[in-house]
Image: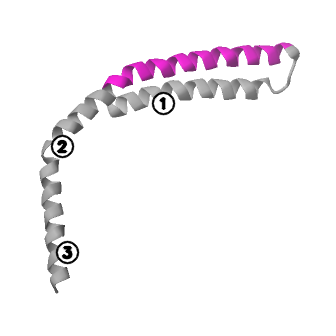
């Protein structure tokens, strides 16, 4: 019986300490939100730059396949174009969703 009371007292004490520790949680959440939203503009520009590089590489690969007479040119062009569109759309949607 004594161990139950000791355990109950310890549990109540921990719960009270946890409740007191959460007093400044709002300031921490606000600061974290500001830090994350501060990184969205540079990250979005980085994804756009990666999309541009992927597009250029894809254009060169498609041109080389087209020049060599490869019958798979349409499939390659569609896959590279789809990858570029995905990068641009994903960056734009994530930015609009989180900001």
Q: Secondary structure at mark 1?
A: helix
Q: Is residue 68 above or below residue 32?
A: above
**What residue sits 55% from the left and 29% below the top?**
86
Between 4 and 49, the one lying in front of the other is 4
| Mark 3 neighbour class, 10 Å CA radius: few under 14, some 14 to 19, many 20 or more | few
- Picture quarter containing residue 11? bottom left
Which residue is rendered at x = 19% and y = 74% of the image?
7
Location of residue 75 by image quarter: top right
Q: Nearer the viewer, mark 1 or mark 2?
A: 2
Q: Verify CB contact (< 8 Å) between mark 1 and mark 2.
A: no
**Residue 90, numbered label:** 1
> Disc 2 vs disc 3: which is toward the camera?
3
Distance from disc 2 to disc 3, alpha carbons, whole Å, reads 28 Å
The local secondary structure at tag 2 comes to: helix
Furthest residue toward bottom: 1
Q: Is residue 10 left or right of residue 55?
A: left
Please provide the residue range marked out in magenta. Answer: 38-67
Indicate yes or no whether the magenta region holds residue 40.
yes
Task: Please give the residue where the numbered disc 3 appears in the rendered image.
Answer: 7
Q: Mark 2 = which residue? A: 25
């Amino acid at each position: 019986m004594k161990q139950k009371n000791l355990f109950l007292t310890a549990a109540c004490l921990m719960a009270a300490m946890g409740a007191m520790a959460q007093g400044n949680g709002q300031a921490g959440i606000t600061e974290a939100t500001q830090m994350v939203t501060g990184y969205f503009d540079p990250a979005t520009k980085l994804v756009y730059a990666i999309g541009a590089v992927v597009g250029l590489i894809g254009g060169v690969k498609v041109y080389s396949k087209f020049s060599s007479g490869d019958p798979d040119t349409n499939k390659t062009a569609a896959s590279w174009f789809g990858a570029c569109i995905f990068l641009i759309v994903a960056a734009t949607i994530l930015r609009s969703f989180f900001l």
